[in-house]
Image (spheres, grey):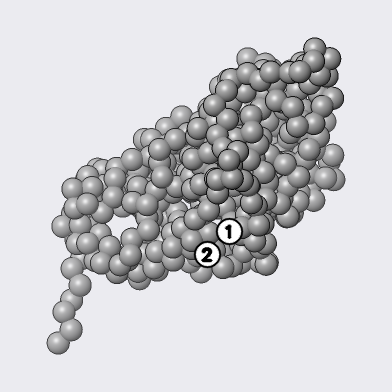
């Protein structure tokens, strides 16, 4: 699939207030009006180009929103103060008390906890299913289902959602498909495949410098306006507003996203292939052994590769923890959650980003104790990185030393 997102981003051109090459940052929490009627009209949502209050919108947030809409190919986008701010707002905008959600079983732990433990306060139920099995997904849909939710590439098992097929299923039942595309910006374009709403944690690849927390909802003009409605919009009333200074910073970082994603994918592909040849159980969508490999190839944007995330099963939690500590000591990266940083980040999902999921359910999902999730960095010499990582594994008896050729 040919992706024009990079062209769309490059063609965005804003001038600062005094002709600067970067748009001016709006450093105000509230905005003045020349007439009382104009203020009233703005409260009622009947004006274009007027700013009311930064919790509602600001020029800096709108600049970033336009860039993210261009990235995902949607009509518009609302930015939020975190990825969870985007997820919670969308969910509560679409669902009322007594409603039902069909969600992938393998999702970010925070999203899982919100849907399973928090939404029950509003009598909203969630069925967690194998999103790769369309028959199971359809069987889970009830007359009260108001949303199908999945991650394009799931956290942490890297399962691939067939977004086009899920979209057709959602349309058949008259419900929206919401896709979290945090793991695969540029590589996958969910809106073009039929997703109604696309969510990102901007904290990760899109920002790319691990210095802020932010999120976005990409969708239609009508839906994004509804989220910002001063009377009933979940985005407005829950208060998940992104700070203007951070919005301006993320917008600048987006300009290198296409370069970074290509390098993340290139490095991860090399490491995944190398460690699979070494006999380790590696999960990476770019490997032919990945069960979603061929499906992903059929709809991905090939120039950006298969992404920067991979997992390797070290056999036990003790070995996983020892390896991560040793790799950090050898300056290979950081024992830290999150992803998309220039340095490699590694964590054991079962005891970190997916710890909200009960152990029994982790086992049912296939999330083993020894699983390590790697967000591979932008290393210039990835062969050197592989050699040092392998030395660490040999030292901990995870791998055998290579036999010298005679």
From the image, tell me which residue sits under label 2.
305
Asked if residue 172 is positioned above or below residue 264 in the image, the reply reads: above
| Residue 31 sits in quarter | top right
User: In this rendering, would 117 be left or right of 347?
Assistant: right
- Residue 149 position, x and y percent, is 66, 39
Name the residue carrying label 1.
Answer: 187
Percent from the top left, x then y, of residue 48? 80, 31
Give the image quarter of residue 321: top left
Number of numbered discs present? 2
**Nearest the eye: 65 or 214:** 65
In this rendering, does residue 303 appear at all? Answer: yes
Q: Residue at x 78, y 38 (%)?
A: 221
Are the residues flagged by discs 2 and 1 in contact, CB closer than 8 Å? yes
Q: Quadrant of residue 296?
A: bottom right
Binning the other alpha carbons within 10 Å of mark 1 as few (below 14), some (14 to 19) or many (20 upward) gives many
Which numbered disc flags the more N-terminal residue, 2 or 1?
A: 1
Instruction: From the viewer's perspective, tell me whether residue 94 is left or right of residue 383.
Output: right
Q: Nearer the viewer, residue 2 or 255?
A: 255
Q: Residue furthest bottom?
A: 406
Residue 204, given in percent of the width and then of the height, sits at 47, 44
Disc 2 versus disc 1: distance between alpha carbons?
6 Å
Q: Residue at x 33, y 40 (%)?
A: 336
- Residue neighbourhood size for the residue with mark 2, other residues' Cα within 10 Å, grouped as few (<14), some (14–19), many (≥20): many
User: Which numbered disc covers residue 387?
Assistant: none
Q: Which residue lies at the image location 53% right of the left edge and 59% below the top edge? A: 258
* Residue toward you, 220 or 193: 220
């Amino acid at each position: 699939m040919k992706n024009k997102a990079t062209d769309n981003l490059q063609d965005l051109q804003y001038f600062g207030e005094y002709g600067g090459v970067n748009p001016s940052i709006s450093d105000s929490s509230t905005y003045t009006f020349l007439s009382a009627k104009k203020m009233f009209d703005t409260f009622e949502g009947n004006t274009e180009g007027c700013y009311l209050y930064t919790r509602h919108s600001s020029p800096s947030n709108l600049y970033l929103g336009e860039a993210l809409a261009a990235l995902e190919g949607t009509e518009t986008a609302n930015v939020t103060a975190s990825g969870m701010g985007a997820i919670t707002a969308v969910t509560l905008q679409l669902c009322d008390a007594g409603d039902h959600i069909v969600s992938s079983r393998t999702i970010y732990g925070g999203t899982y906890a919100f849907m399973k433990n928090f939404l029950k306060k509003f009598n909203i139920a969630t069925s967690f299913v194998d999103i790769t099995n369309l028959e199971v997904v359809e069987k889970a849909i009830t007359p009260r289902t108001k949303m199908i939710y999945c991650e394009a590439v799931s956290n942490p098992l890297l399962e691939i959602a067939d977004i086009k097929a899920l979209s057709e299923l959602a349309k058949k039942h008259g419900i929206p498909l919401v896709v979290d595309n945090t793991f695969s910006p540029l590589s996958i374009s969910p809106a073009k495949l039929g997703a109604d709403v696309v969510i990102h944690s901007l904290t990760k690849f899109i920002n790319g410098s691990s210095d802020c927390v932010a999120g976005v909802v990409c969708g239609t003009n009508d839906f994004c306006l509804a989220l910002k409605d001063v009377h009933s919009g979940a985005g407005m009333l829950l208060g998940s507003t992104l700070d203007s200074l951070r919005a301006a910073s993320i917008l600048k970082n987006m300009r290198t996203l296409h370069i970074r994603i290509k390098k993340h994918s290139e490095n991860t592909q090399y490491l995944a292939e190398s460690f699979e040849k070494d006999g380790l159980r590696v999960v990476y969508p770019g490997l032919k052994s990945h069960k979603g490999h061929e499906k992903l190839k059929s709809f991905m944007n090939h120039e950006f590769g298969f992404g920067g995330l991979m997992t390797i099963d070290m056999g036990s939690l003790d070995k996983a923890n020892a390896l991560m500590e040793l790799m950090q000591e050898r300056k290979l990266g950081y024992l830290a959650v999150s992803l998309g940083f220039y340095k490699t980040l590694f964590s054991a999902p079962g005891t970190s980003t997916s710890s909200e999921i009960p152990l029994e359910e982790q086992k049912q999902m296939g999330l083993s104790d020894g699983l390590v999730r790697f967000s591979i960095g932008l290393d210039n010499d990835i062969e050197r990185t592989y050699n040092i990582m392998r030395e660490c594994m040999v030292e901990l008896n995870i791998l055998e030393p290579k036999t010298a050729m005679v």
